[in-house]
Amino acid sequence: MFRYCFALVLMLFTHLVLSAENPDVRELMSAEEFAASGFERLTEDEIAAINRWLVRYTAQDAEVMIDDSPAVKELSSAAIKSRIDGEFSGWNGPTQFHLKNGQTWETRSTRRYSYSAVDPEVEITTNWMGISRMRIVDTDRAIRVRRVD
């Protein structure tokens, strides 16, 4: 009896964990990407079908695409150009930057830099090792960052 109950609890827990981690296009895309895709016109069943495809694709084909697709390689190496949303006063240790494109980035360094601007233009590049660097275009100052959202 104990084994049966333990197995049932384990199955239930596994189902909850897996269902919580399944990707949803509504969470993976920015609001702008979701609107531009036309997905907002789809029914819940149609969105669920896309999410099922996404799981299957990720499990079976994504690694091959990452390794072999020139389009994916070009996109992953392309610079992100945007603006910091609102007032900017530089960075001081762990600092988050909310960009106008909806992304949020955070410093990966304890360095300090003071500069005041409103909506400064930034460029984020990622090197072949996967390390991202955000550069303030006006001053050419840069710092290592990682994407938070």
Image: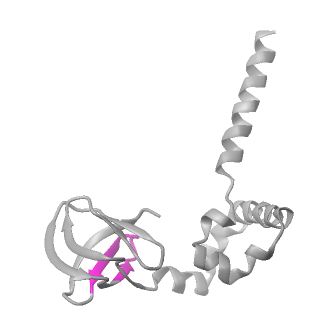
Residue 7 versus residue 103 in the image, above or below:
above
Identify the image quadrant of the N terminus: top right
Residue 15 versus residue 77 in the image, above or below:
above
Q: Residue furthest bottom?
A: 138
Find residue 56 and report its horizontal and vertical position in percent. Answer: 77, 61
Query: Is 117 positioned to the left or the right of 40 in the image?
Result: left
Return the residue nearer the eye: 17 or 116. 116
Tell me which segment is drawn in magenta.
Answer: 123-136
Asked if the magenta segment contains residue 133, the reply would be: yes
Instruction: Give me the residue at 73% from left, 60% from top.
Output: 55
Find residue 140 and report its horizontal and vertical position in percent. Answer: 21, 87
Instruction: Give me the residue at 70% from left, 36% from top.
Output: 14
Find residue 32 and report its horizontal and vertical position in percent. Answer: 59, 79
Residue 140 versus residue 131 in the image, above or below:
below
Instruction: Give me the residue at 62% from left, 82% from top.
Output: 69
Return the residue nearer the eye: 66 or 54. 54
Query: Is 17 positioned to the left or the right of 116 in the image?
Result: right
